[in-house]
Every structure is written in C-alpha cells, then in structure tokens.
Image (cartoon, rainbow, N blue to C red):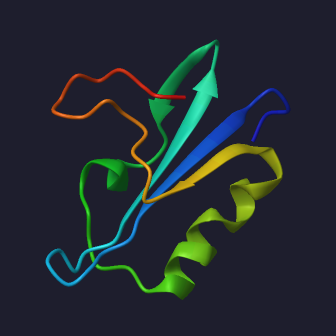
Amino acid sequence: MQNSQKFYIGIDLGGKTKPTTGLCILEESDGKLQYLHAQCRFCKDLKYSEIIKSIKSYLPKTEVISIDGPLTLGKGKGLLRL
C-alpha cells in the first residue's frame, strides 16, 4: 500500500429476507475512487470473522466505514455519496 492511498469500506449486513452480507472496499487514487476487489460487485454470505479478516490491513488508512449505509445513489446511477 502506498502512503497516499485512502480506503472506504462498505458493509451491507444480510437479514432475514436477504441472507447475504456484502463487503466492498474502495480505493482513492489520483482523486478517483475505484473498486479494490472483484467482491465489490457480488454479495455472498460472509461470516463476521471473515469481514474483520478482510478489512484489517486497510483500517489504518480507512477514511470511512459505512455499515448498512449505501455508498452510491443506487439504481445504477454510479454517483458516490461520499
């Protein structure tokens, strides 16, 4: 990881109607945000310990962690709410 990198983490906790938990890590580089992992595009059932393990190395340079709070305006608009 470079010193100038910043990360934004989104966690969408699954519930009774949608049991999958989504995890997305966005990286800010050159003033632009981009997906850090392919998993950002696909939700899967993650255990809480897997979430912690996945984000642990990014925490020192993380600007925002959003839990059950969308990072985008939704419906494929692609505009970030950051």
Answer above or below: position of 22 versus 71.
below
Answer above or below: position of 51 versus 32.
below
Residue positioned most to the top: 31
| 26, 19: nearer the viewer | 19
Q: How many marks?
A: 0
| 27, 14: nearer the viewer | 14
Q: Position of residue 15 (x, y in %)?
A: 27, 79
Residue for point 56% across, 86% down: 49
Answer above or below: position of 69 versus 5.
below
Residue for point 83% across, 53% down: 60
Residue for point 22% across, 22% down: 77
Lateral position of residue 36 relative to residue 30, left or right? left
Q: Position of residue 72 (x, y in %)?
A: 36, 33
Q: Quadrant of the N terminus?
A: top right
Q: Quadrant of residue 44?
A: bottom left
Lateral position of residue 64 relative to residue 43, left or right? right
Lateral position of residue 22 relative to residue 81, left or right? left
Lateral position of residue 79 relative to residue 43, left or right? right
Q: Quadrant of residue 74?
A: top left
Residue for point 34% across, 56% down: 39
| 55, 38: nearer the viewer | 55
| 2, 6: nearer the viewer | 6
Q: Quadrant of residue 75?
A: top left
Q: Position of residue 66 (x, y in %)?
A: 54, 52
Q: Position of residue 53 (x, y in %)?
A: 61, 76
Q: Quadrant of the C terminus?
A: top right
